[in-house]
Image (cartoon, rainbow, N blue to C red):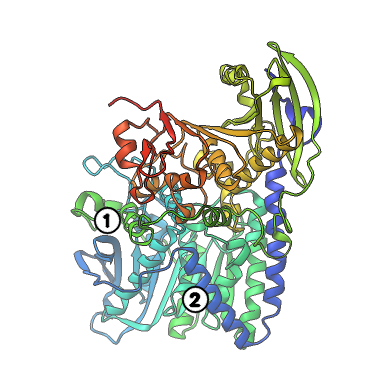
Amino acid sequence: MLTFGPRVDGYYDVEDQLIHYLRRRAEAAFRRREREREALTSIEAFEARRAQLRETFLKAIGGLPSKRAPLNAKVAGTLDRGAYEIEKILYESLPNFPVTANLYVPKSRRGAKPGPAVLFVCGHAEEAKAYPKYQQVCIDLALDGFVVLAVDPPGQGERFQFIDESTGEQRVRWGTTEHSYAGFQYYMAGMSIARQFVWDGSRGIDYLVERPEVDAKKIGVTGNSGGGTQSVFLMLAEPRLAAAMPCTFVMDYESYLKTGQPQDGEQNHWAGFADGPDHDEYLSAMAPRPVRVGLAAYDFFPIEGSLAAIERARKAFALYGAEKHLDYAVAPTTHQYSPKLREAAVNFFRRALRGEEETFKTQEPEPLPQKDLWVTEHGQVLRSVAECHTVSSLLRKEIQLELPLSPRVQEPEALRADLAGVLGIGAGQPDGEAQWKGAPRERVIYPRVIQEANVHGYRCEKLFFFAEPDVVLTAILCHPRREERAAGAELLLLPEGTAQIPQERSRLIALLERNRRVCVLDVRGIGAVRSRGIGRAAETHGTEWKLGCDAMKLRISTLGLRVFDVLRGFDYLRSRFDAGEVAVSGVGIAGAWALYAAVLEPRLAALSLEGMPLSFRFAAEDRFYDPEQVNFLTCAWGILRVGDVVDMLPALKPRPVRIDRPMSPRGRPLTTEEVGIEFLNPATEIGLIGEKASGWTPAITGLADR
């Protein structure tokens, strides 16, 4: 069977086309947002914009709880460290969702007049609050008279969310991997795991406010890396902050986009490129309250973007005559909360919260062993606190509350409109960001057939065409032996596209022997138009993650782009073969492209899915899922707000639908019992084993034995 060589057999260099496509759309968004910021020439206009950005951010992460439940704070022990004490604190940011923290209290503050405090939020260190460099920041602040609350974020310190509770073994790696693993579940539900980080920090401020040593009007925040992320989020979301020093995180989206680097689950949120806030807007959210930005000269976050963001934010401070309330400190180091930044932080909070001169000099304070700072008996809340929530169980609760099974079947046209919207297909994008103006698929397709060959007695064509400007799609089109009697065409979608043809020879021949043409299509980023690798080497934050997050921040999706390509493949086959019948088949993860294309295009005559997960809702509601099947190739932000796989089926009636070897979200074949009970949405009255009313029955085969 035919396949393509490099660069579409030398006809087109395509490995950057999806990368450049997203970058062009991002740059259009950046220029538009620049114009919007330049129009903010008064305090009134700026404050209205700031309020809008706060609302945009909170909506993008899924909102915050409307009620503050009791903290149920407990002190699990106290360590005497001479000039200060460390209290081991456990509080609940949500009912039964424990947060582990260390409270540093200078002895001079016991019984004294309430004074300033600092919330320390941790970056991506496994030990979190016990990480030596983070301890040293807290110790220096405490030695200078500040109360400091250092908080473990989910997935770090004592708060691993995916361990085996009986053994403590990590079933999903701590930190960024955990954040992105759980974060993708939140994305599917139209939320962000950032909401848990923000709320944990906000409730940490609640705890500080309750302490007799703390003046509620003099609370600051600092953290670096992932702690810098949490800092800037709180700077926008938490109005009680009096000062902030985010470190080794602030840059701007455009400079970071150019590095090709990814960010983890809580650092990406819906429409960040298109609607903001960008990093300068996190800084200006504090205006005119004082902010110092901590920078590392040799950081992987580009310092050029950092300085540009600070200069843009300074314009907002200038509206208040407070330009001096925004400054920065640069350490000649790589990515870390270095001694120089530690000293700069203590001096900043001296000035900002106490009105004192910046005279503090750091030494090398001695950190404690991690175990000494444990709040819980076993060093993990899931092993020490009975029946507590995880980020997964909190999400499941939210999904069941916000996305109950619908009591009605949505009308097909309404379903198509909602699906197109969440996939980001068609109109609705501002300015030059629109994928198309007007009817998106009216452009004429001019295919290039670059080779014909007789393979095993079948005439095969190697071809490519443009799905839209600068986006090449490739395909192998095979004809049955008796072409004049061909009974329509099959648009065949494979996870690796045309590159997978040698392994799928028997499948192609079976279709050809049914006297059907077979077109194996490469959607963008797949097969012969595969994107070059970007992101990190680890698959968690590899190419698909990076591009999927960039698309999400543009209010579109890489899934939607691929579904659009399938629709263009359908257009090509219909135009070439005089509107003959065209069906679509999807294998494995490619089944998602086939399913959503069939929903959006009622002229697709039939749908066949093989080895595809039968429920993405279950992948979001379960604690564990298979990231090889549930990812940006198969899902988009907010897809569950439109519906699950079974909710798509009414829009396919009365077309034939065949589902073979359906899979669970954990990557194992489903049984008859599971299909009929677990994955059936009774509200749709559509059973994969039958339907009560019309007699229309999608066929399901290849179910596993128990």
Q: Which residue is mark 2?
A: 348
Percent from the top left, x then y, of residue 263?
Answer: 53, 52
Amino acid at pointer 2 = Phe
Of helix, strand and loop, which one carries label 1?
loop
Looking at the image, which is closer to me, 400 or 50?
Answer: 400
- In the image, residue 314 above or below residue 487: below
Mark 1: give few (<14), some (14-19) or many (20+) Cα within 10 Å.
some
Percent from the top left, x then y, of residue 655?
Answer: 53, 38
Q: Quadrant of residue 211?
A: bottom left
From the viewer's perspective, is 277 left or right of 485? left
Q: Residue 50: which numbered mark, if any?
A: none
Q: Quadrant of the N terminus?
A: top right
Of helix, strand and loop, which one carries label 2?
helix
Question: Residue at image x 68%, y 63%?
Answer: 29
Comparing labels 1 and 2, the label whose residue is closer to the camera: 1
Q: Which residue is mark 1?
A: 389
- In the image, residue 641 above or below residue 701: below
